[in-house]
Image (tube, helix red, strand yellow):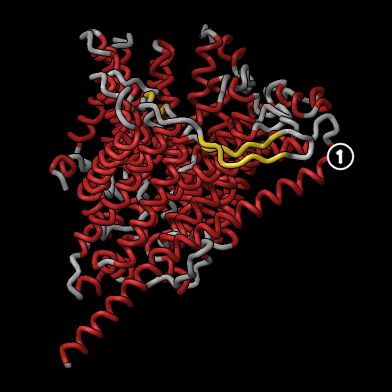
Amino acid sequence: MNVNNISDSEASLARRTLGFTLQNIFKPILQIILFILCSILFLSFIVIFLALILRGSHTEIDLLNNVLVILPQVIIDGLVRGFLFATIALGYTMVYGVLEFINFAHGEIFMVGAFTGAGFASILNHFGFLKGFPAIPFLIISLLLGMFVSGSLALLTERIAYRRLRNAPRLVPLISALGVSLLLQDLMRMIVTATGLGFNTSYRTPDMGKPWQIAKFIIPDGRQAVMSIDSRSLNFIIAAMIMLIGLNYLVSATKLGKAIRAVAEDRHTASLMGVNVNQIISLTFLIGGALGGAAGVLFGIRVGTIDPYIGFLNGLKAFTAAVLGGIGNITGAMVGGILLGFLEAFVASYLSLFTNGEFAGANYADITAFSILILILIFRPAGLLGETVAQKV
Amino acid sequence: MATWQKFLKSDPVAYFLVTAYALLTTTLLLRYPRTNLATDLIFVLFLGTILILHKSALAKSYKLLISSLILGLALPFFGTLNPFYIDVATFIGIFVVLALGLNVVVGFAGLLDLGYVAFYAVGAYLWAIFSTPQAGQIWPAWSSHFPLAPLWFFLFIPFALIVGAAMGVLLGLPVLRLRGDYLAIVTLGFGEVIRVLATNLDRPINITNGAQGIKSIGRPPLFFAPFFQALGWNLSESQLYQLYFYFLVLIMVGITLVVVRHLNDSRIGRAWTAIREDETAAIAMGVPLVKMKLLAFAVGASFASVMGMLFAAKQLFINPPTFDLIRSISILSMVILGGMGSIPGVILGATLVTLLNLQLLPRVAMELGQLNLPPYIDPTRYQRMIFGLLLILMTIFRSEGILPEDRRQKELHEK
C-alpha cells in the first residue's frame, strides 16, 4: 500500500517533469515560430504599403507587381539569414550571460568552423570520394567536425587568453579578445594559402538535390511568384532548428543547464553551492563555439565560397542580433537574429527597387544592421526581450 | 630604479655621454644616408636619443635643446639627403598625434573606441572634397567657388577641428550613456559605416567619388620657397614639400602634447580618471558623466580629423581602403603597447608600431625574399597577426604597457 503510494507519486512527479520539460523546450520554439510569422506579415505589409504609396512616382515600371513577384523569395532569404545570425548570436549571448564579456573572437570561431568543413570536403574530393558521398551523412559528419574543431578552439582561447584576465578591468579582456580575433584571421589565411585551398576557398559538396518548390502564387498582372527553397538553405534551417531545440533542452531541463544558469546569475554564490565555475565557463565557451562552428559549416555549404575574413562582418551582425534580442537571453538571441535577417533581406532586395536603383541595396544592407544597433541602444538598451538590470556596484 | 638611470642624474659625465651619443648617431646617419638595414638601425638609435633624454634626469633646458636640435635640424637635414626616412618620420608624427588623441578616449576616460579611424577619414575627405573639383560634383553651383585656393588650408584646420568634434559628439550621444562594451561595438560599426559610405556615395550624388578615391588633393602654399632660394638652398619641390609636411606635423605634435598634458592635469583630466576608475563613484562625487565622456570623445575626434586633413594633403590621394578597421586597430595597439594613459608611453608606442610597419616588416620581407621562400610567408601581409599577437601578449603579460603611467601601474598590481 505504502509502496504503491510512493511509486504513484514518483510517477506523477516524472509526468510533471516531463510535461514541464516539454513546455520549457517547446514554448520558446513556438514563440519563435509565431514571431517569424508575425514579422513576415508585418514586413510584407510594409513593402506592399510602400509600393502602393510610391506607385505614382514610378510610372515606367509596375512597382506593386515587381514587389510581389520577388516577395516569397525575399522571405526565404530572410529566414536563412536570420537562422545564421541566430546560431552565431547564441555564442555571444551565452558567454555574455555567464561572464558579462563580449567575445570578439566568436566571429572567427564561426569562420574556423566553415574552413573545417571546407577542408574536410576538399580532402574527400582529393581522394575522389566526394561525388558519390550521400548528402545527409556528409552534412552530419561536416557539422560534427566543425562543431568539434570550433568548440575546442573556443575552449582553448578561453583558457589561454581570457581566464587570466577575469579579474582585470573590463577593457583588458576585450582588447585581448580583439587580439585573438585578428590572430585567428591571419593564421587561417596563412593556412589556406599554404595548403593550396586559396584565399577564396570554394566549398565543394556532393549533389544536394534539386530546389524544393513550396508554393506558387499568381500576382495581379498574371505572372507567377514562386516560393522555392534550395536544399542547402533547407538543410540550414532544419539543422539550425534542431540545434536550437537541443540547446534549449540542455539549458532549461538538465542539471548542467541549471549550473550554467546559476553561474550566469551569480558566479560567487554558484561556487558556494558546489558548482565548478571554471568548468561551467569552459562548457559555455565549448557550446557557444560548437554552435558557431556548425553555423560556419552550414553557411559555407550554402554560399559555396568562403574566405578568412567572413567571420568579422557576420560576427558583428550576430552581435547586433544578440543586443537586439537582449544580450544574455537565449530566446532573445534567436528572435533578434531572425528579425535582423529579415530586415537585411528586405533592405537588400527592395532598397534599389524603391529608389529607382539610385542606392544599391546590397551595399546598404550592412549599414542597416548598425543603424538598428544604434537605434536600439538609444531607445531600448536592454533589447527586445531583455529586462533592465540595475548595475551591480 | 635602474642603475643607469641613477647614473644619468645630472652628472657632468652623463651630459658628456648623452651629447656624445647624440653626436655619434647623427654623424653616422649623415655619413651613410643610403637606405639599407644598417641605416635603419642607426635611424632607430638616433630616434632613441629622445627616449634616453626622457628617461634621464638631466636639466630640462638641456633636454629641450638637444631634442630640438635633433628633431628640428639634424632630422630635416638628413631628410634632404634621403627622402625615405623623413617620410617615415612624418608618418611617425602623424601617428603620434592620432595615438595621443585616441589615448584621451581610451587611456584617460577609459572608453574603448574601435572606429577611431572614421574621424580621420572625415577630416581627410573634407579637405579632399573641397580642395578638388569634386565639390562641383556635389552641387554644380559650387564649381565656381571650389577648389579652394592653397592658402585656405590653414583656415580649414579649425573647420576640420569643429566638424571632427561634432562627429564625435554625434556618435557619442546615443551610446555614452551605456556600458563600455557596447561602445566598443558601436564605434566598430560606425567605422565600418563610414567606410561603406565612402565607398558607395558616388551615387546618386557623387560625394566621395566611390572606390576610385579622390586624386590631386590640394596642398598648402609653399610661401617660403622664394626665401629659401634667396638663401641659396636649391631644393626640389618634392623635397620642399617633404620638409614642409615634416615641420607641420612636428608643430601639430607639439600643440597636441601641450593640449593633452594640460587637459590631463586639469579638472577635466581628473574627472576622466574618476570615470575610468569607477563610474558609479564618479557620479556620486558629482562628476557630470555624459558631458565629460562626450568631451573626451570630441577631443579625440578633433585631433583625428585635423590629422586626416594633413594626411590627405600629404598623400595627394585618398580612397576608402586607407581607412579600414586595421588602421584603427594599429592605432589602438600603439596606445596599448606604450601604456594606456601615459603620454610618453603612447609616443613611444606610436613610434615603435610605425617603425615596425614601415621599416622593419618591409625590410624583413626583403631579406626573406632573397631566401626564395614561398610567397605566403611575406611578413608585410600579416599585419593583423602581428597586431593580434601584440595585443594578446601585452594584455596578458604587461597590461600597463612599456612606459606605464604611475597611477595605472599601481592600480594593476595592487591585487
The chain containing the residue under callout 1 comes to A
- Image quarter of the C terminus of chain A: bottom left
- Whether residue B53 is visible here, answered yes or no, is no
- B74 and A159: which is toward the camera: A159
- Choose top left, top right, bottom left or bottom right for residue A52: top right
- Image quarter of the N terminus of chain A: bottom left
Identity of the residue drawn at 23% across and 48% down: A155
- Choose top left, top right, bottom left or bottom right for residue B40: top left
Q: Indicate whether A321 appears above or below A361.
A: below
Instruction: Locate residue A251, reporting x and y percent.
Output: 32, 63
Disc 1, SS? helix
Structural crowding at the residue carrying mark 1, measured as other residues with C-alpha within 10 Å and reported as few (<14), some (14–19) or many (≥20): few
Q: What residue type is labelled 1?
A: Gly
Identity of the residue drawn at 16% across and 48% down: B1
Q: Indicate whether B166 appears above or below B17.
A: below
Identity of the residue drawn at 69% across and 29% down: B207
- Whether residue A221 is visible here, answered yes or no, is yes
- Choose top left, top right, bottom left or bottom right for residue A349: top right
Query: What residue is pinned by disc 1?
Result: A56
Instruction: Locate residue B413, reporting x and y percent.
Output: 22, 58
Q: Give the residue at the far left of this rendering.
A: B3
- Lateral position of residue B92 relative to residue B370, left or right: right
Q: Give the residue at the far bottom of this rendering.
A: A1
- Lateral position of residue A377 relative to residue B336, left or right: right
Instruction: Locate residue B175, reporting x and y percent.
Output: 53, 56
- A51 and A33: which is toward the camera: A33
